[in-house]
Amino acid sequence: MSILIDKKTRLVVQGITGGEGSFHTQQMKEYGTNVVAGVTPGKGGTLVEGVLVYNTVAEAVKVQKANTSVIFVPPAFAADAILEAAFAGIKVIICITEGIPTNDMLKVYNALKGKDIVLVGPNCPGVISPGKAKVGIMPGFIHKKGTIGVVSRSGTLTYEAVKQLTDLKLGQSTGVGIGGDPIIGSRFIDIIKLFNEDPETEGIVMIGEIGGSAEEEAAEFIKKNVKKPVVGFIAGRTAPPGRRMGHAGAIISGGKGTADEKIKALTKAGIKVAESPALIGITMLKALEEKKLKINPKSISILKPPAKSEKTVKAKVKPAASVIKKKIKK
Amino acid sequence: MKIHEYQAKEILKQYNVPVQDGIAIKDISEFDNAIQQLQQRGINQFVVKSQIHAGGRGKGKIYNPGNRDELILEGGVKFTTSVDKAKEYARKMLGNLLVTHQTGTEGKIVRTLFITEGLDYKKEFYLGILLDRAVSKNVIMASTEGGVEIEKVAAETPEKIIKEWIDPVVGLQPFQARKLAFSLGLDGEAFKNFIKFIPQLYKAYVETDASLLEINPLVITNDNKIVALDAKVNIDDNALYRHKDFEGMRDFNEEDPLEIEASKYNLNYIKLEGNVGCMVNGAGLAMATMDIIKLAGGEPANFLDVGGGANKTTVANGFKIILSDHNVKAILINIFGGIVRCDRVAQGVIDAASQIRINVPVVVRLEGTNAQEAGILLQNSGLNFVVAGSLKDAAEKVTSVLKK
């Protein structure tokens, strides 16, 4: 199993005729995602990357039985696009768009609250269930089918973590980028609940950053409910207070939302916090090993081979660097 | 976007929020005219207020920017009943350096003054409206502890802060304004005025797409009027496209010149105090890269997110901006190519480096799509790069170049 998306996903791409929309439609199809329709108001009847475009999401749902939507609509129209998908009966809405006004998201969030709809994002890379479906903009090839659930507020930092896991032969059940905005549809806690209930997910990686208190809330939940090993990382230890670090949500204000506070909360909840972003993968590997040891003390060597593979990765890289240095000395 | 107090009050006036009346001046030659206008409005006591994008102005100190040891005036906000005294204060503030607990030791040059009426009041409150991210709703916060640092109140006596969350579906309700008024212990005329004040203020907050609206202090005057004595408004950057009228309110003097330069190239740059410059794609990875620089024994000199489209031009501009900071002793480039191809980024780095004179070591780490091809390109370039593989390797290489 996986969460949110899989082989049953029937995807509609909102904003399919735009540059981003058409490019990523092609990329998602190439990965094997079942893209059944596109939507751009006024462009109904045209074809983009072999996908039929409709004027409304309602039509795409009616004719093509779309059950999941991905949104590439420009920020000024994105809130409307989310609501259109929701009212058309779409149950999983993934919004990639960056730069939606907070006031717009405030309305959307509260309109969807309590309904049986999952919104991921906005301002996120999307969701991927390796080997099954990719709904978003992440590079598919760094992923590997497996048992680790990854949830993160960031894009490229998630790729970094996924690459580390894959290099250690730790595949992923699903990777979810929840987005870096102050108001997002799904928070850490929502996704971690799903990973906790997913029998295929054996471990969870949670990548947070400064600002807000979503990591602390998730830590409380994990402490009470999650028995699977959880590894955490918080970006922004060196960020100064009062400055927005790229993401609208990544700001330390009034002494709240600091990395140290979050790391403390995570550690207290039994989450293994990686000190460095370079150690996210290896920390997960160790956490799984520890868990296996607890269940069966004789199973020590099970996870050894992947550790070796990390060395081979490094070895490949080192000669290149030393060659350059030699060249320079000459 | 941050705006000045006088600009915030201009906006609030349009929403019928009672504010302390005043006139902004940028040069001492405008002073006499401003005072005359205020006098014509029946005002005979004045407050001279420095306009900078930082709080704590009243308790701040004015220094000579040419000689930082020379204290010119105690306080960046001054009350007086004398016109001559007001002019003297204005002279001492304009063009000089105001240092407050929020500006840091470097302070900020006072370029604008707000000459306002001096009000007699009997009580000060705190009032703030902002987004409560924990519940994704706006919250109105009020406190009887006005005129002081609200962060201090929140930390020491959190029970003194009253909160009222607004449901965006139905908006602010009258009972909520009454609740706030009762909690602040208001009655009579002041109560009536307050419950009229709150909906107007909330309307201003929502319709201007503010991300913060803070009135500290909000006062009850001797004749029971509710007046915003100060006003701090931040506007949601993502919503600026629907407020063209606010464009002129951006004060470039309040921003770091390097950051303005970077924003011209669509680069997200924030200058910091350290010695290792970095160039990264993605905000989260950029923060993580800063963290790894610190773990490697350096201090990040900046935050720089080149965004999704890292190419020759963005990399070249990134280099220029990083190198104009003379504290930079080494540069770490960390790009995770997803959709972006690493070999293209590598070519961009090579082209930029051969055009610009770079006299500090550059550690390059390109990972993801076509990373191997990128490594070969960098190797064969004949330029002085230190190529790193994993993130861990990059950190170690930063440490080693710093030791040299």
Image (spheres, coloured by chain):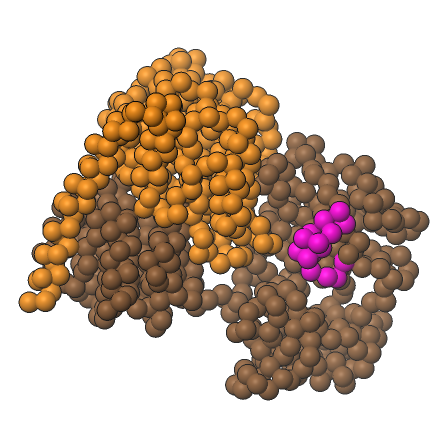
Chain colours: A orange, B brown
Q: Quick one: B98 or B292, which is closer to the camera?
A: B292
Outermost residue to the left: A330
The residue stretch that appears in magenta: B146-160
Residue A41: quadrant of the picture: top left
Is A220 on the left or on the right of A90, as rendered? Answer: right
Magenta stretch holds residue A240: no
Q: Which residue corresponds to the image point at 52% horizontal and 74% vertical from the top-left?
A: B106
Tell me, yes or no, if residue B322 can be seen here: yes
Residue at left offset 57%, top offset 68%: B103
Left/right placement of residue B297 relative to residue B98 reads left
Position of A256 with respect to B297 (left or right) is: right
- Pick the front one: A153 or A311: A311
Q: Residue at x 12, y 56 (%)?
A: A322
Quadrant the C terminus of chain A occupies = bottom left
Counting from the top left corner in percent of width and height, residue A240 is at: 49, 58
Place of residue B80 in the rendered image (x, y in percent of width and height, measured from the top left): 79, 78
Q: Farthest residue to the front: give it.
A: A298
Residue B158 drawn in magenta: yes
From where the camera sits, is residue B207 visible?
no
Which residue is situated farthest in the right direction here? Answer: B188
Q: Is residue B376 above or below residue A312?
A: below
Q: Is residue B51 above or below residue A250?
A: below
For the N terminus of chain A, which image quadrant? Answer: top left
